[in-house]
Amino acid sequence: MKKNIPMLLLLSLPLISSTALMSADNPLNQTVMIGTPQITNESFGLWRKGSDAFWGDTENLFADVKSGAYNPTHSKYIEKLDKTVGNFAKNNDPRLPELIDLCRTNYRGQIQLRPEKAAAAHACLYSNRKTLQSNLKGAIESNDKKFLEEQNKLIAALKESLAQQITAIKTNLDTHKKSSNDLLNKESGTIRKYKKSELITHKLNTEFTFSKNEDSCDCSTNEKKNPDDVDTFYSDQHILEALGIDEATYATLEKSEKTLKTLLNIQELLKSISPLRY
């Protein structure tokens, strides 16, 4: 007898498994009807018949399922649910998804639709889902294309604007170079005339003495030079150095040239951007 115990356990496994499947906590029982309910055939009564005639039995049925008043063991209710599901599917009623979901939410494992009604509901839901997906695809594509079109316009405007700004910056730089050179050449020429005359005074009288004030004369480094060579030893660069602004002047031009070069590189990068396509 003890030798038969393992065999009995093996034979009882299918029964144990089926019992587990029928438990209330099993996920399958969240949608599948649990067992066979006891169906009643009671009449709805005059009040409900009048209400169905006035409001419509499908409207009343939907309201009952939604509120929890639906009786899944009442034969008339079962017929009306099948009819409502069929009508919703036939008329493509937008409440069909909600009705189907309510059958599961409010009456988990208690409702069994007729096969043809379930098939009609499924076909309607599937068709609507495919249509909605197709519409969503079209809407997303249209939205993306509209966005890309606007982006391309903005990028094109940026390219044009940058080109115009670079031209303006380059023109401004060239104008500044010319005006600076003209200003320096004009004023430095006059300054050299005075410098030349200063040196000549030293030639006209070599015995006069300078004031102890250092600012009164700076000819000590040039007094022995030929005044006629003033253009050489007292050049524009020397004048800028004497003014103490030579480094700042050249730094201004250098930074401007570097900035312009950077902007031209950016412009080339922008030119390489092709119009965005979907």
Image: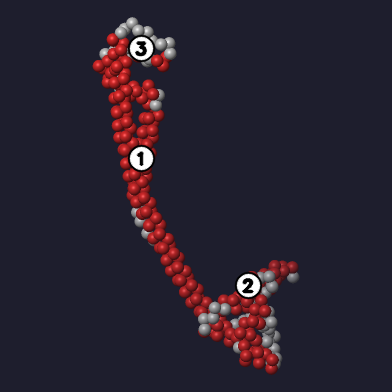
Q: Position of residue 180 (x, y in %)?
A: 33, 32
Give the left or right position of residue 132, taking residue 188 as reference.
Answer: right
- Front residue of 11 and 134: 134
Q: Given the current orientation, which residue lies at the most extreme bottom position?
A: 46
Give the residue at mark 2.
Answer: 28
Q: Given the current orientation, which residue lies at the most extreme right position?
A: 1
Gap between marks 3 and 1, in whole Å? Answer: 43 Å
- Front residue of 210 and 17: 210
Residue 265 visible to an observer of this rendering: no
- State yes or no: discs 3 and 2 in contact (Cβ < 8 Å): no
Question: Which residue is rendered at x = 35% and y = 12% of the image?
Answer: 220
Question: Which residue is rendered at x = 40% and y = 63% of the image?
Answer: 145
Give the residue at mark 1.
Answer: 260
Q: Secondary structure at mark 1?
A: helix
Please state, as top left, top right, bottom left or bottom right, where the C terminus lies in the image: bottom left
Q: Secondary structure at mark 2?
A: helix
Residue 237 visible to an observer of this rendering: yes
Q: Nearer the viewer, mark 3 or mark 1?
A: 3
Q: Is residue 278 above or below residue 69?
A: above
Residue kind at label 3, given as amino acid type: Ser
Residue kind at label 2, given as amino acid type: Leu
Q: Position of residue 34 (x, y in %)?
A: 66, 78
Give the left or right position of residue 275, taking residue 110 as reference.
Answer: left
Mark drawn on residue 220:
3
Residue kind at label 1, given as amino acid type: Leu
